[in-house]
Image (tube, coloured by chain):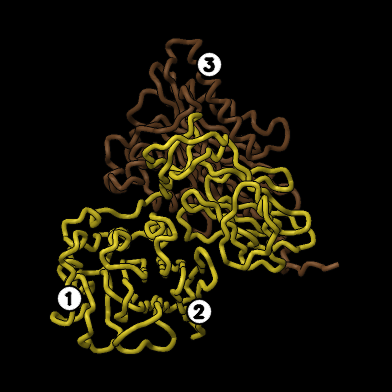
Chain colours: A brown, B yellow
Amino acid sequence: MTGEPTIRAGAATDVGLVRAANEDNYVVTSSVFAVADGMGGHAAGDVASGLAVAGLAQLGLAGVVRPEEVRRHIVRLNGDILAAAARNPEQWGMGTTVTGLCLVDFAGSPHWVVFNVGDSRVYRYAGGSMEQLTVDHSEVNELVAAGKLSPAEAATDPRRNVVTRALGSPTAPEPDIFVFPLAEGDRFLVCSDGLTGELDDGALASVLASWDDPRDAAASLVRAAVVAGGRDNVTAVVVDHVPAHTPPADDETAPRKVS
Amino acid sequence: MEVRYRPGGWVAVTGPRTWLLVAADAAAPLVARCWELARAGADEVELVGAIAADGLRAVRDFAVAGFAEGAGQVIVRGAARVELTGTDGSTRVVTAEHVSTWVETRLDRSTVRLVLGGPVTEGSALPLDSGVVRAGGLDIELAQALVPAEPAEAVQAVAAPVVVSPAAVAVTVPETTKLPVDERTTHLPAEGTTEVITHLAWAVAEDPGATRARPATAAAPTLVPAIRCDSGHWNPPHAVACRVCGAGVPPQQPVDIPRPTLGALRLSSGDLVQLDRGVLLGRAPDVGSDQSVRPHVVRLRSPDGDISRNHVEIRLLGWQVFAVDLGSRNGTVVAPPADLPFDLVAYQPVEIVPGTVVSLADDTSFVFEVVG
């Protein structure tokens, strides 16, 4: 690949029809695209998710990012949220999910890092199909993994909102990190569980297929989730890697010269 | 999709999307485990996980195939072999001769027929959609070949094949299977020609596996049995010294935990990639969409083009780490920490230990490190 990749992104959020406050936050910079779904009383959830996205916005400001920095940065954010809660008793116990994509330099070429703590999700939409890139850190997902719950039961289980990893935990959670190279034409969806709780993967895919501009796609997704019930705050960030016009040359593997 | 088996001394387990032929006793726990998974619609990777749950030494010979929505995989170990027939009528045989672990091949829509074979088969092929039988071979028509398939052979009396009764199959096939009941059962041999498995605990219809399906969302974490050192590092159940800090590990009862990060690859560029999952490395790597847990994918710069598109893959199985050359043009060299370097044989996984250096080209290599 030559030159800088062209990335376009759009984001939308809505409080929904049931909740009094929107405790979701998102961030879109030139290299970081993330959603944070906060939890805690007295609007502390909004504080926690706000701290998380503000912290993530710092990534990339000091130059090229490496995957390991993403991991360390997220672990540091856990400490920042704990420290903020310690200064303000009303915010005691606040926490947040944090999930998204970061452009990094890896082995000399641009790669994506998908990161996740909690039950917000990143999907890749490419070639007409949706693929969930993150694994939910939720109690029901772990029960499904252990064979104690079917996926159908998980969708309605009362424990489905219980996350097993979150920022703001006394012991820093280990973020899931997943590295892969950029591919032109890829579209990503980063979203809070308010979106995936209302729309299944097929519905998400059909909305993503209907809108070319990522801002329209994000707005349309959030609107659809609110119409479908809007039982939670809903946030969507859509990220496109826009194809360049020159196809990349990629020849056959050359036989190694033997001296 | 049409599945037939040839009677023989091994055991075949078939489900809606996966087929297994294994040299095992029909009463072996692994057969029961695989049947539970196969009929619930598990994929081939989950089946291999169930086969290897007691360690790879516990089972020598098996072939597993899985195919759904135009993609799949074949995994072969020991004396088992698989013949693949393409849309153009060409055939290819996958064997695992001289391989200590297993050999695998991906499938796409260009494959129309799979024949899983053990050493010996007896008698004619009999239809079987979902069940457990004593078999020496399995024949799976994935799609209509250009040449029409032979008509199904008439059912004959055979020595002592064992087939789950039609009633049991009808009850235990999960509801996720879209086949109507009559289609599921019509291919079973007529009554009287087979011996029904009724004495095995897992053959009863009330089995909860019938209601369990493959998770609809991304794969759930892999669980491994583990014990801890005094500093709290997780280790394999038989560890004597901690893999992270080297301290002695006191004897204790293992518990199942989500697999911890097994270490990291330190690339010659200085970059680090964590082994919380497998890693695919190459010049223009392309991971199939059929893998339940996606590996990290690393694109390596190769100005001279001597690194192949898909060059080498690191795979995790339980606590073990394997390196597999993906048929790269210029090969992969593995240098264990206290041994002579050697070339990987294409597609033959080799276990690597911390300190091993893996080289893809003169200036491109990585080290498997254990990090705390």
- Please determine if labels 1 and 3 lie on a single subunit: no
Q: In this view, does B222 lie above or below B331?
A: above
Q: State yes or no: discs 1 and 3 in contact (Cβ < 8 Å).
A: no
For image coordinates 22% across by 53% down, the residue present is B208
Q: Is mark 3 on a helix, strand or loop?
A: helix
| Structural crowding at the residue carrying mark 2, measured as other residues with C-alpha within 10 Å and reported as few (<14), some (14–19) or many (≥20) | few
How many residues crowd around disc 3 within 10 Å: few (fewer than 14), some, or many (20 or more)?
A: few
Type of amino acid under label 2: Val
Residue marked by disc 2: B93
- Residue beneath disc 1: B195
Q: Are marks 2 and 1 on the same chain?
A: yes
| Above or below A227: residue B62 | below
Which element type, helix, strand or loop, lies under badge 1? strand
Image quadrant in which the N terminus of chain A is located? bottom right
Q: Nearer the viewer, residue B246 or B130?
A: B246
The residues bearing labels 2 and 3 have C-alpha atoms spaced at a distance of 61 Å
Q: Which chain carries label 1?
A: B
Q: Nearer the viewer, residue A250 or B353?
A: B353
The residue beneath circle 3 is A83
- Please state the chain letter of the residue tagged with numbered disc 2 in the rendered image: B
Give the spatial CA distance, label 1 vs label 3.
69 Å
The residue that appears at 56% across and 62% down in the rendered structure is: B349
**Residue B151, how many percent across, how many down?**
31, 89
Type of the residue with mark 3: Ala
Residue B203 point in image, percent of width and height: 19, 63
Snapshot quadrant of residue B360: bottom right
Number of the front mark, 1 or 3:
1
Kindly state the secondary structure of the residue where label 2 is placed.
strand
The label on residue B338 is none
Q: In which quarter of the image is the C terminus of chain A?
A: bottom right
